[in-house]
Image: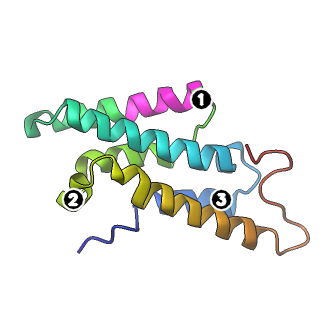
Amino acid sequence: QDNLFLVGSSGASAVLIFGHTQSPLAQPRNLVGGHILSALIGITIRYLIPFPDWQWAACALAVSLSIICMQMTKTVHPPGGATALLAIIGSEKIRSLGYWYALSPVASGVGIMLLIAWIINNIPANRSYPARGKWW
């Protein structure tokens, strides 16, 4: 069964935002921008290459364009590549969402994760999230 509020790439994001809080890849700009831009790219590529025989090409193109876009916008977040990939190889329920996939589950999930990371990572006195001056 599909859980439309859970994206597989969220697990990798959790490792970054809870385990490596000071990494540039774990900062809010990267978390939000990397996932949302990659989701939009993945959806667009799926619409441009809708042929099942060409799914391998769509996957490669979506991930590579996501990387380029994240580098250009300074929002590199490695799990974003998986978010683009899931827009193409995800279940029928995920694919049927179209561009709504970028809003829910991706943007809503990222927003929830960011709020929890901000709360949890600032409880210990020796920790701070996001890195000073890195909200955006």
* Secondary element at image label 2: loop
Which quarter of the figure is the C terminus placed in? top right
**Residue at the spot of label 1:** 73
Disc 1 or 2, which lies upstream in sequence? 1
Query: Few, some or many C-alpha atoms within 10 Å of disc 3 (few <14, some 14-19, many ≥20)?
Result: many
Question: Residue at label 2?
Answer: 91
State how far apart marks 3 and 2 are (Cα): 27 Å
Q: Which amino acid does label 1 sit on?
A: Thr
Question: In the rendered structure, which segment of residues is drawn in magenta?
Answer: 63-72
Disc 3 and disc 1: Cα gap in Å?
A: 19 Å
Q: Is residue 78 at all visible to an observer of this figure? A: no
The mark lying in front, picked from 3 and 2, is 2
Residue 13 occupies which quadrant of the picture? bottom right
Mark 1 lies on a secondary structure that is: helix
Q: Position of residue 87 (x, y in %)?
A: 30, 48
Residue type (three-letter) at the residue carrying disc 2: Ser
In the picture, measured across the screen, residue 56 lies left or right of residue 66, that is: left
Residue 113 placement (x, y as % from top left): 59, 65
- Queried whether the magenta region covers residue 60, the answer comes back as no
* Colouring: rainbow
The question of residue 66 being in magenta is answered with: yes
Q: Which residue is drawn at 71% across and 43% down?
A: 24
